[in-house]
């Protein structure tokens, strides 16, 4: 089956993304396809390339990225939720006069329409929020 | 049939709300902070019999509540079982 | 998904309290803009989003009432509140904006028994 | 502040649930490292931080039990739990790590009536 | 005498916890989501008389609950009054 | 009197920093001194220079910065809480191999000891968290 995930919590501050990641691995292990992960609300912080956890802890951004590389899972981040929270890509940084950015591929900034499309397109749609 | 996923403690507003949404035949899966419900076999969701209630084993064990759930004879599923539940239920709603 | 069923957006968080309310309403507006028939259910503290005397909050906290008022323009006219929520909050229907309809316990649970897309905020 | 009073750190959040517990314990350790006499009060879900069978959680979620075990090394030996909390959680003292002492309602409120530095997590 | 500041709804765990910490003569200030307590004059903190309970007017008005608080004859302070309360109380504790 | 504030919530996601800012203004209006604001837990996001709220909304980082400029209020950010959450200054970015950073003056990364010092030194210490 095709699965879509909605993740609405920040790493370390919230168990939601940690649960979502474990669930994603289990979905793939059972032979399903992960059609996409959408990050909304505080979940946008999962995409931060500046995330710097202590060395003995998992870097959640790297874990999502690895999932993308192994299974080609799209990682979409709500642009409105992200900008408010200080998560910007190169184009948005330029547009708003920031000299730096902290979101890059495979994460993509996109609109909420993408969330609805994912929900419609998938056989199963599971939300992770705490 | 809907799979309801509760992620907050049984004393939370969300726990009261999911009870209003549950229908006969549904399944309620307790994950994250919701596994604290293992401590209290008198909790209203445990004492009803119209829907199924399950604890996520991984989260239960991480919180050191595995033995207590066994003592209270509460049913658990592991992460693979969680995915199986989503296969069986076309619809899922998360309460937080 | 059955296109004939309403898209259900559940709002359970109060105004000025985290951005759950705002981001939930945004999702409802986008669903409506995509041509979906959207039904909003305000449960628990979410019902406070409908208080008609709300104002802007602390600096940087936008009022949510203008978004509530905008719902009609997007053809979102199903604003539901459980009777139980109003009783628990001790909140009278006359304190809320116009056009809100109340649901019995059975009507609330029925919304979750049908196959429809649901987003729960 | 009266140096003679313990520094009180209140922990009300459960392990693996947001970083409140970890960041609260960090504050307690730093206070102890600064030479303060630190008392820890575990209220409500915070008491679950003392469950002796805890383990590491989902990937990226560190176990908090090693930090609890470390408290003694920092001379933090006052680990208090309200009796009321244990009753409400239906949690037995035998499920908790060694060295925890329970407080009556009056003892709990008395902690907040004295002039001492308090951090509430 | 301690100033206790509650920022979460009267149904929250934090609301139950602050009641355990309050002593006679203390003051409980309700801000942010705690001002929802204005709706319910039966809430246990309103019906006791050993400590003072106040609502932060700014947050009450923002949530459209100002009139309801007046109807229930509940006491309020504005932001300046909040600062004055912290002047009068050497100690403050925030519950969230 | 000397006031110290502890802020433990993120802008937009949490009312705590908005309350703290209003309180800070009221403290100063009553003739007190604001000896420092310490950002801990999700409060570290207040320091993000990449925060990009819609134009009709207050930028909380800019508001804290203005408070600093007008009243010389130190703005200290817990380094451990910040790094985990993707808030880094130039030095930490270099040390951890990041090509960008999102915390700059007047915000300062500092240890938790600074929080305890602030609490000890001030006549009044008020926490904002939700």
Image: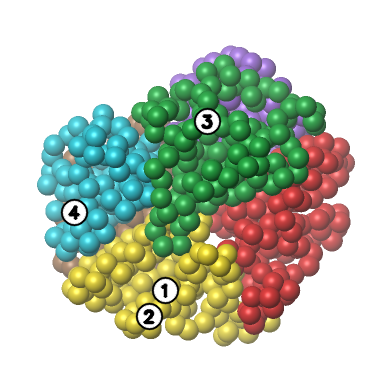
Chain colours: A red, B purple, C green, D brown, E cyan, F yellow
Q: Residues within 10 Å of mark 4 (few under 14, many from 20)?
A: many
Q: Which label sits in the foreground, 4 or 3?
A: 3
Q: Could you say whether the residue bearing mark 2 is in a helix, strand or loop? A: helix
Residue at which label 2 appears? F68
Mark toward the viewer: 1 or 3: 3
Q: Quadrant of the N terminus of chain D?
A: bottom left
The residue indicated by pointer 3 is: C99
**Looking at the picture, does residue D30 appear above or below residue E96?**
below
Image coordinates for residue F129, horizontal then vertical, percent:
39, 56
* Nearest to the observer: residue E90 or residue E87: E87
Q: Can you say whether A15 is above or below D88 in the image?
A: below
Task: Please name the residue shown 26% across and 73% down the image.
Answer: F28
- Same chain under badges 1 and 2? The reply is yes
- For the residues labelled 2 and 4, the Cα–Cα distance comes to 29 Å
Q: CA distance from mark 1 to mark 3?
A: 41 Å
Q: Are marks 4 and 3 in contact (CB under 8 Å)?
A: no
Q: Nearer the viewer, mark 2 or mark 3?
A: 3
For the C terminus of chain D, which image quadrant? bottom left
- Disc 1 to disc 2, C-alpha distance: 6 Å
Q: Residue at x 39, y 58 (%)?
A: C58
């Amino acid at each position: 089956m095709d699965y879509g995930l909605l993740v609405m919590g920040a790493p370390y501050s919230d168990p939601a993304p940690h649960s979502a990641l474990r669930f994603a691995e289990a979905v793939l292990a059972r032979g399903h396809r992960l059609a996409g992960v959408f990050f909304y609300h505080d979940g946008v912080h999962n995409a931060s390339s500046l995330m710097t956890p202590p060395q003995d802890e998992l870097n959640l951004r790297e874990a999502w990225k690895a999932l993308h590389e192994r299974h080609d899972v799209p990682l979409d981040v709500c642009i409105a939720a992200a900008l408010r929270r200080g998560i910007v890509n190169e184009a948005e940084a330029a547009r708003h006069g920031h000299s730096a950015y902290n979101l890059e591929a495979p994460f993509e900034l996109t609109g909420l329409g993408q969330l609805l499309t994912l929900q419609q397109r998938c056989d199963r749609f599971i939300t992770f929020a705490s | 049939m809907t799979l309801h996923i509760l992620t907050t403690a049984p004393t939370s507003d969300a726990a009261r709300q999911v009870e209003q949404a549950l229908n006969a035949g549904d399944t309620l899966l307790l994950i994250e902070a919701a596994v604290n419900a293992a401590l209290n076999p008198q909790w209203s969701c445990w004492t009803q019999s119209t829907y199924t209630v399950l604890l996520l084993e991984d989260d239960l064990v991480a919180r050191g509540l595995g033995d207590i759930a066994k003592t209270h004879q509460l049913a658990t599923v592991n992460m693979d079982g969680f995915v199986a539940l989503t296969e069986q239920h076309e619809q899922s709603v998360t309460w937080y | 998904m059955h296109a004939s069923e309403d898209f259900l957006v559940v709002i359970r968080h109060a105004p000025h309290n985290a951005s759950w309310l705002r981001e939930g309403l945004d999702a409802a507006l986008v669903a409506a803009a995509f041509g979906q028939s959207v039904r909003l259910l305000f449960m628990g503290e979410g019902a406070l989003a409908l208080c008609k005397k709300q104002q802007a909050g602390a600096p940087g906290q936008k009022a949510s009432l203008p978004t509530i008022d905008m719902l009609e323009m997007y053809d979102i006219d199903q604003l539901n509140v459980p009777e139980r929520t109003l009783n628990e909050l001790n909140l009278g229907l006359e304190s809320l904006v116009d056009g809100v309809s109340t649901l019995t316990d059975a009507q609330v649970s029925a919304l979750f028994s049908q196959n429809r897309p649901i987003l729960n905020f």
